[in-house]
Amino acid sequence: MSNENNEFNADELKAPTWLDSQFLKNVLANNLKDDQLEVLYYKISPATVKGDHYASVMFRVAVEYMTQAGEKASKSLIIKTMPELEGFKKEQLGESHIFQTEIGMYTEILPKIEAILREASDDISLYAPCLYCSLDPRQVMIFEDLVPLGYTVVRDREPTLEEVKCAYSKLAKWHAVSYKLQKEEPAVFEKYKYSLMELPKIMEDPFMNGIDYFIRMLDEVPDLSVYKPHFEKIRANYQETFRASFVEYRENRQENAYYVLCHGDLYIRNMMFKHNKESGILEDCMLLDFQMSNVGPMPNDIIYSIYQMLSPDQRQYHRNELIEYYFSNFTETLKKIKYAGELPNLAEFHRQLFRQRYLELFLLTTFLPLMYCVKSGKQKSEDMVEMRYKEDLRQSFYRIEGYVEEVRKLLKSFEQQGYFE
């Protein structure tokens, strides 16, 4: 892997020394129950490009091997591990619970949810096969590569409405089962309490304070300056208000709130879609990266996905349609799995979405500009971690024409809905 290739993250250009032939042999031999398996050849490359992800380091390994029976075979693996290069990324993630959370999701929670759905005659696949996982001596997970199976990441275009609905359908079913379990067996989710806000030193991360850049942008755009007082008013408590959304279940539980096991990071590149090679028809989608999964308010995943998954047109013209589509799948699934309690209702869900409006304002002022940066291609020439320290560069995200135009539409809508009251 060449260091000259600037398309990839720096920490994915060189594989760790432990990722060698012997390690791969042990993994495959254990997975295939073949002690005599021999690795003939392997090639390591970055599994993702800049802008795909932030937490962890990922490699793709193409392996050719020979079985005990003398048959040659090959497999493509995705290796996910912790950063080993010194720097901010290792410092922030090194003491986090992200691998404990994700390993638990793949080995305990997702299989349990999937089994409940299948008992209700829903033959669903919620996750990619995890072939190996470990916390000691190193934190690592190994998955079957979905690319050879026909799955792709949406990178150079916006997701279609059909793709978004496919993702929301799977999310709704997962949420429904977790809603039932949280009511009936809350101890199942006891250890799933580490959201984005529990990452070490997250509140010290300069990226998390985007409101100053946002206010500066409002001041520079004549017709948007009228909104400046609203954001100056919330500036002092800005971080605490959006943090409250993530930790509500653990620190300030509301009596009538809908709580589920949230994905926690429904970013468009944390999912893959499979289309029929001949017809182009969408056949499936797969949600990925469960490192931030935690029990929290049901609206959180939806609000997060609105800004991290939907296109600008979908946010403006299809928001309510998509929310209703998600919610109808959620309630229908509750019925299918024979949930005995009172069914949540859409009107109350909309009220709870409104109650989490500070999370939405945070995403608008902090995460959405980065999404526009990713779409502009700037992340291909800049390290995503280093970008947060370059004030002029970061302020430029807030001047991207598409972002300013969308802010104009969203702030008008927020004002009409009473977000600033």
Image (cartoon, grey):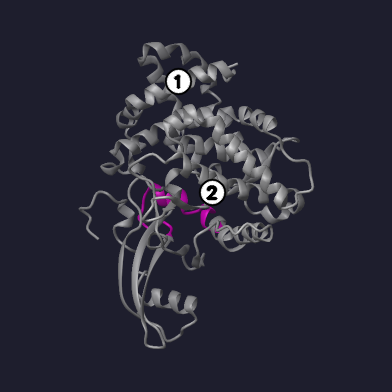
120 sits to left or right of 150: right
What is the x, y in percent for residue 375?
34, 37
Q: Quadrant of residue 255?
A: top right
* 188 part of magenta stretch: no
What whole-number distance in Å separates the C-alpha atoms at marks 1 and 2? 30 Å
Q: Is residue 102 above or below residue 392?
A: below
Query: For the residue labelled by badge 1, is the local secondary structure a helix, a strand or a loop?
Result: helix
Q: Is residue 415 above or below residue 13?
A: above
- Tell me if mark 1 has few (under 14), some (14-19) or many (20+) residues whose alpha carbon lies within 10 angstroms of its own: few
- Identify the mark at residue 409; answer none if there is no mark: 1
Work out whether residue 274 or residue 39 is closer to the camera in this orientation and state it: 274
| Amino acid under disc 2 | Met
81 sits to left or right of 246: left
Location of the N terminus by quadrant is bottom left
Work out whether residue 217 or residue 386 is closer to the camera in this orientation and state it: 217
Residue lying furthest bottom in this view? 69
Q: Which residues are magenta?
A: 81-100
Q: Nearer the viewer, mark 1 or mark 2?
A: 1
384 sits to left or right of 144: left
CB within 8 Å, label 1 to label 2 = no
Name the residue beneath numbered marker 2: 292
What is the x, y in percent for residue 59?
36, 60
